[in-house]
Amino acid sequence: ASTGPSDFIREIVAADQAAGKHGGRVVTRFPPEPNGYLHIGHAKSIYLNFGLANENPGGICHLRFDDTNPTTEDPEFVESIQDDVRWLGFDWHDKKFYASDYFEQLYEFAVHLIQKGNAYVDSLTADQMREYRGTLTEPGKNSPYRTRPVDESLDLFRRMRAGEFPDGTHVLRAKIDMASPNINLRDPVLYRIRHAAHYRTGTAWCIYPAYDFAHPLSDAIEGITHSLCTLEFEDHRPLYDWVVAESEAAHRPRQIEFARLNLTFAVMSKRKLLELVTKKLVTGWDDPRIPTIKGLRRRGYTAEAIRAFCEHIGVAKRDAIVEMQLLEFFIREDLNKRSPRVMAVLNPLKVVIENYPEGMVEDMEAVNNPEDSTAGTRRVPFSRVLYIEQDDFREDPPKQFFRLAPGREVRLRYAYIVKCTGVVKDPQTGAITELRCTYDPDTKSGSSQEQRKVKATIHWVSAAHAIPAEVRLYNPLLTTDLAKVSPDQDWTQSLNPQSLERLTGCLVEPSLQQAPVGARYQFERTGYFCVDPDTSPSSLVFNRTVSLKDAWAK
Ligand code: ATP
Ligand code: MG
Ligand code: MG
């Protein structure tokens, strides 16, 4: 706070505090509907709401489940949302609320509105209501039920609650202005009849409040000072203010809108994510290819990286699309600092060092993390038979290729300079099955003769010591940006059939034997990887979190 407000919301909050509004308090809320898992877009809202509360003395951010739709909500989502907010590093300090706990209070507010003559029960059909609503250019028309006597509306509303009417027969509407240029003010629906069980209130209710009614009142009930929401709600604000004013609540929360996060090539709509999961187009809510918090976490993202990303993008009043590469930049930066380096060969090619004594094993000293001097070193066994990356050898090297090729030398990381002296091929297919090499014993890394320079250094594992592993590489889930797919097209046609590549014959250095689920590493020259929960004692499985920006020897 000492550096002053850094965005338009913080400016508003600072001004409110300076003016002594809300008794100088800041109370925000994060209000997810428990109808799906949280994604990176929600992280932006979490970071903003909890951040704002945390940076103001006495500030608090409520976690509120906006659970007013009986048919889509589920306790599974309530659990996962709490888990994700905590994992992201935030705490609601016991201020956990459910909009469904306010059902009785909301009903009382509605009765009060009817009594004041500011709400009425309408009995038009849904089609008729749409027709009467008018358009952007044409004013709406009053419903014939708009002048219904207060007592009749009160009686009907009570009977709606008592379950006397089927779905769709009546609604409760606010009486505002059918000619308003703002369609949201044309007598918006406040309650609908829905004979459906709610995951918390069961069948106690068969009428459910609309978002535009429940949300401002929930904010008022909880004493929210600044109610932050995304830009789509900007033209709902007059209705928000109307509801709050009508409720005569002692407390007046203020709605402020900010731009939602859009990420290129990411599926961020809850509806689409649900479709991916229910149609099994992904493996679940934690599939590393989707930008849910659970998916990012399984992919190897850290909460620190997600927070740093949110801090960087900030909040603005204009919608913008953020490149996926920006999110990747932040995870790379974080993992570069914290992840131990190891050697892993994803596409192995066998190498025999002909002049290296059979049966001899040397433990080479390898640096765990050049970015962290406290991370120390480890021993990596070196022997006569090794594996290197297929890509690091070319029989017929192009001009800019400086790695291994017949007659050429390369340094094996932490070990020796080796020279390729021969190539063994499969007599049937002609495919290269093995390289023959010699090593120069005077070139051991760290020894005094190390000075001899070669153009490239490559990674390797010792055949006798390496551990087999499966490595999962992830490519973008979409081939086309969804913004370019028209709504009447089947968007799932844009799914990339190559979004998951499973490499099953990989070999990793023996230090990874006991790697626990979730542990993160840099596979030298290849990228950042983490241990997937599918790992079992008999088979290690790694996810590629993100590739390295630059391999140090290309
Ligand atoms: P629904 O499809 O149910 O409307 P939603 O994406 O609006 O889903 P909510 O559970 O209502 O999800 O979201 C909780 C909070 O997260 C809201 O305050 C919403 O504004 C915010 N939020 C959701 N998506 C984004 C996003 N992409 N960027 C920023 N904030 C978001
Ligand atoms: Mg919502
Ligand atoms: Mg939404």
Image: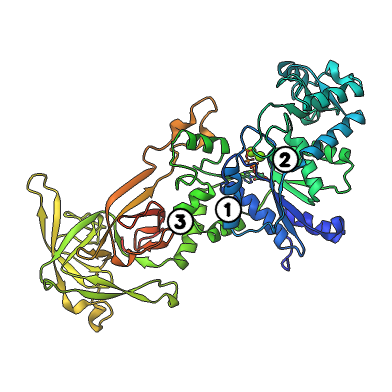
> In the drawing, what numbered circle is on residue 83?
1
Q: Residues within 10 Å of mark 3 (few under 14, many from 20)?
A: many
Kindly indicate whether the residue at mark 2 contacts the one at mark 3 (C-beta within 8 angstroms): no
The kind of residue on which mark 3 rests is Gly
Label 3 residue SS: loop
- Residue 300: mark: 3
Residue displayed at 78% across by 54% down: 12
Q: Which amino acid does the dot numbered 2 rest on?
A: Ser
Question: Which quarter of the image is occupied by the C terminus?
Answer: bottom left
**Which residue is rendered at x = 71% and y = 63% of the image?**
55
Q: Give the farthest residue toward the bottom.
A: 448
Q: Nearer the viewer, residue 479 or 43?
A: 43
Query: Please, is residue 215 above or below residue 493 in the view?
Result: below
State the separation of the CA atoms marked 2 and 1: 20 Å
Report whether residue 390 is seen.
Answer: no
The amino acid type, in three-letter code, at marker 1 is Asp
Which residue is tagged 2? 100
Category of crowding for the residue at label 2, using alpha-carbon neighbours closer than 10 angstroms: few (below 14), some (14–19), many (at least 20)? many
Q: Residue at x 87, y 25 (%)?
A: 154
Q: Does label 3 or label 2 sit earlier along the sequence?
A: 2
**Which circle's residue, 2 or 1, is located before the other in the chain?**
1
